[in-house]
Image (cartoon, rainbow, N blue to C red):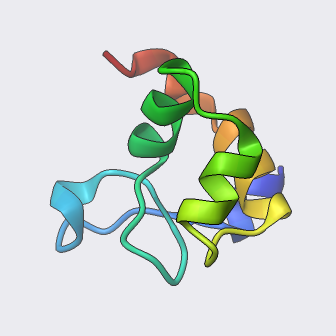
């Protein structure tokens, strides 16, 4: 699973929400941007610390079905 090496959660960071390792960017936040019409290019331009692999991990993260 691609997300195992790129997505992490820790109760001390963002109340335990899954985040991209090395950032404080949550999976939920990026998915909401995408849901609101942001393209991959817009996400990369606004959050250059994200990689293509990180974005793939976010979109494949299994708990995303629980997102409100």
Say if 20 sits above or below 30 in the image.
below
Q: How many marks?
A: 0
Q: Position of residue 10 (x, y in %)?
A: 31, 68
Say if 7 sits above or below 60 in the image.
below
Q: Position of residue 36 (x, y in %)?
A: 47, 21
Residue 27 shown left or right of residue 4 in the figure: left
Which of the two residues, 44 or 4, is positioned nearer the viewer here?
44
Residue 2 shown left or right of residue 29 in the figure: right
- Identify which residue is drawn at 82% across, 55% down: 2
- Which residue extends farthest bottom? 22
- Identify which residue is drawn at 51% across, 84% down: 22
Which of the two residues, 14 or 25, is positioned nearer the viewer here?
25
Say if 28 sits above or below 63 in the image.
below
Residue 9 shown left or right of residue 15 in the figure: right
Q: Position of residue 1 (x, y in %)?
A: 83, 50
Which of the two residues, 49 or 61, is positioned nearer the viewer here?
49
Residue 53 shown left or right of residue 31 in the figure: right
> Where, quadrant-wise, is the C terminus in this rendering?
top left
The answer to which image quadrant residue 54 occupies is bottom right
- Identify which residue is drawn at 62% across, 31% down: 62
Q: Position of residue 38 (x, y in %)?
A: 59, 33
């Amino acid at each position: 699973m691609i997300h195992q090496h790129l997505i992490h959660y820790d109760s001390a960071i963002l109340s335990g929400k899954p985040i991209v390792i090395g950032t404080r960017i949550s999976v939920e936040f990026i998915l909401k941007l995408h849901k609101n019409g942001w393209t991959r290019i817009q996400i990369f331009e606004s959050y250059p610390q994200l990689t293509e692999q990180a974005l793939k991990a976010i979109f494949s993260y299994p708990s995303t079905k629980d997102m409100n």
